[in-house]
Amino acid sequence: MEKISFLICLLAFSFLSKAQSFKNVEDHQFAINIFTPGFIYEKGLSKNTTLATEFTIGFEAKGCTGCETLYGVYPAFVGQYRYYYNMERRLRKNKNISGNTGNYVSGSIWLQSGNPILGDLQKNYNITGVIAPIYGFQRTYKKGFNFKIEGGVGYSFNNHEKGVGVILHTTFGWVIRKKKK
């Protein structure tokens, strides 16, 4: 009986490991952004999910009618757990999915410095955070050109303020690919 149980477990494990080995997403993807200078590393976790980390810059402007407009450019970190929900449909329609080309929803956390690297919009805190559900889409073309547009509504916080706000994020750049042999 023990041998049969062991054999069933071994067969189940080998079946599950083969089923998990086929992914629609890339195992590893590294991209460099031009529009918002920075880079993204995306790690494929399962068939349609990735963990994306991004080091970039953020821009913020503050002003009103009759007052001075201030701006700042800040270093930022973004972490996302992405689920690409339309990969199977793209495959059925013979569309590209390489380079994680697809639409996704994600849970995101954004951390941004309060000290600008450019500009005069000084903050009275060191770091602000944002937690948000995000909807986005990413496209990667044959030569590696990549763009991403995403947005959502998030909860932002620092040691002085809390609130809800809109998040819009766009990147244009290139996916760094290994040369095929």
Image (cartoon, rainbow, N blue to C red):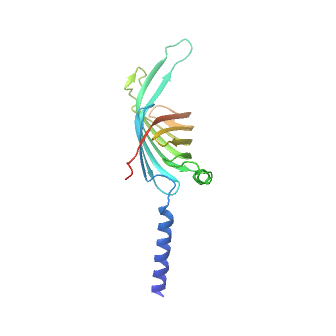
The residue located at (45%, 21%) in the rendering is 71
The residue located at (41%, 29%) in the rendering is 74
x, y (%) of residue 30? 40, 44
Which of 109/36 is in front? 36
The residue located at (52%, 57%) in the rendering is 47
Q: Is residue 84 above or below residue 162?
A: below
x, y (%) of residue 34? 43, 32
Q: Is residue 131 above or below residue 6?
A: above
Identify the residue at the far bottom of this view: 1
Q: Is residue 124 left or right of residue 62?
A: left
Which of 163/103 is in front? 103
The residue located at (49%, 63%) in the rendering is 20
Which of 3/18 is in front? 18
Which of 34/166 is in front? 34
Query: How many marks do you count on the picture?
Result: 0
Q: Is residue 118 above or below residue 56?
A: above
Q: Is residue 55 above or below residue 26?
A: above
Identify the residue at the far top of this view: 66
Q: Is residue 28 left or right of residue 106?
A: left
x, y (%) of residue 55? 40, 38
Residue 42 seen in render: yes
